[in-house]
Image (spheres, rainbow, N blue to C red):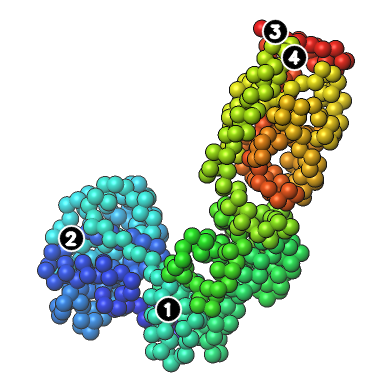
Amino acid sequence: MYLALYRKYRPRTFDDVVGQEHIVTTLKHQVQTGKLSHAYLFTGSRGTGKTTCSKILAKAINCPHVHDGQPCGVCDICTGIDGDSITDVVELDAASNNGVDNIRTLREEAYFVPTQCKKRVYIIDEVHMLSISAFNALLKIMEEPPEHVVFILATTEIHKLPVTILSRCQRFDFNRITAQQIADRLQYIAQKEGVALPSDAAMLLGRLADGGMRDGVSLLDKCISTGEEITLQLVKDLCGVADKSHVFDLYDCVLAGDVSGAIHLLDDLAAHSADMGRLAQEMLSHSRDLMLCKVMADFDTVTACAPDERDRYLQQAAGIAPEQMLSLVQAVAGGCEQVGRAQDPRIALEMLLISLCTAGGQFGSQQSVPAVSSRPVTAAQNTAPAASPAPAAPAQKSVSSAPASTATAPAPTAQAAPSPEPDDWQGIMSAAPPPSEEEMVAPPVAAAPPARPSPDVEAPTPPAAVPDSAADGALTAFEPWSQVLAALGDCNKLAYTALQGSQAYLSGDALLLIDSKNELFLTLMRSSTQTKKDIRQALVQVTGQNYRLGPYRSESRQQPTGNPQLEKFIEHTRAQGIPVEIKE
């Protein structure tokens, strides 16, 4: 009868265990010195050697020919434990024997002295599956066990064990095995089986094993069973793994905003039986590799990056704006979670690709500023005003000096406050109460109020319609605002709609004040960082210059009356062309 490779090559001694040197060294020393604990707890992810080490420890405890803490592997005790014919070593599956009656039976048997071995060893696998009453029954005998009994508990979910059990065991945490260690072990097994296994195919199997040696050996067994020569392409085909070049091509489409190209690539991968869930995980892993490539010079030491792929990683990472890298990884991670839960993973993956590609090219440098410069230069410009706000000081003074000469005039004049930082809209744009004069910048109001019609009849007006605001030299109408809105409509439809009928004014050389009566726009500026980034991107695309953004409201909308009906009456009166002056 054919024996699966993971059973045939299961480690028989501590020296055969891969990737758990810190554990086997301690266990060997305990066996050598005879200082054994009455209860052990092995915890870790699947396929890391918990059950294997449990059996090796059971053999080492009872083997009459132990050498350097290792069982001999050839005596009747060792061969009997390997063949499950020794009654003094009991392996219990807690997943199917999780009741209190099973533990009561174990307690009754534990008091009998061993017949063939030195000690009775109870290996309880998946111990976290025991019921509460079963844990309580086990607790008593673990607290005061007979001298001839040793308990070895194994679990993948340590958090489900009661603290009372944990405190009575020596705990050993099994690490996830690295891809290189798995690949080396697979090549050793392939050599024993007389099969050629290339190093690149072994490394791919090691990565697919995801830290579990058993999974890696099972995948190798699957490849050998085809009877063909094992190659990298064969491993990809059998395991449903997308070629890495296809993942690079998918990300090229995402960064270029090419929805059609991304969907065609996905269709081609599906035609070649690529697993959609695996492809989503490959995309997430690729996002992580790009992120580390962006922040580390030696990123290939902590990623599974092949030498021939390093240059392409560097090239693709250079096309992603630094401030957008985390947003890209978060978007892909959220989409992968949806793919894992979806009834049709392909549709969910298509939705993810469409959402990434239709994000206005915000992740890539090619689409951000096609007529001005590359995105990395734009990112540096975006950070410059925040890092050195000193040049904005003269503009603030020139705006503030205007009201000083007209303080005695009957009509209210412009009031200026320190220029807000690009992202400082919190507390400035609140729906109620309206902002104070120290938080807003208002231009002088003309003598003819009809220049500011009521919201009921307001129509989109070009910025040049309010030229009197520049009379004092404080604010100037921003001429290209309509072009900026058109560019904004390509990347953020919601903000474009909210800004219909808005105007913009330039204060100094770097501060742009936006005047919009739409409360939705004010809400977006308070809560959405992406909205502000999209506006700045549109400004750079149209003007080639980066501006800081600030809020703006006319005086008629700044001064609260505390009476909604009176405010409505004042607004209606001003709409009729009748001057209204509010005095304290």
Label 4 and label 3: CA atoms lie apart by 11 Å
Mark closest to the chain's N terminus, 3 or 2: 2
Residue 583's disc is: 3
Residue for badge 4? 411
Work out whether mark 4 precedes mark 3 in sequence or the reverse, and give the earlier one.
4
What x and y, as percent, mark residue 195?
46, 90
| Residue type at the position of mark 1 | Ala
Q: Nearer the viewer, mark 2 or mark 1?
A: 1
Q: Which residue is mark 2?
A: 37
For disc 1, the marked residue is 183
Measured as percent of width and height from the top left, residue 91 is found at 31, 66
Task: Check the image and report above or below for 122 versus 497.
Answer: below
Reading the chain from its start, which is encountered first: label 4 or label 1? 1
The picture quadrant where one finds residue 560 is top right
The nearer-to-camera label among 4 and 2 is 4
Q: Are marks 3 and 2 in contact (CB under 8 Å)?
A: no
Please say if 511 is above or below 218: above
Give the CA distance from mark 3 to mark 2.
Answer: 87 Å
Answer few, some or many: residues within 10 Å of disc 2's Cα (few below 14, many 20 plus, some between 14 and 19): some
One can see residue 434 in this view: no
Query: Mark 4 and mark 1: span between their CA atoms?
Result: 81 Å
> Residue 515 or 217: which is nearer the viewer?
515
Contact between labelled residues 1 and 3, with CB atoms less than 8 Å apart: no
| Residue type, label 3 | Lys
N-term mark: 2 or 1: 2
- Residue shown at 73%/63% (left/top)? 258
- Which of label 3 and label 1 is nearer to you? 3
Q: Disc 4 or 2, which lies upstream in sequence?
A: 2
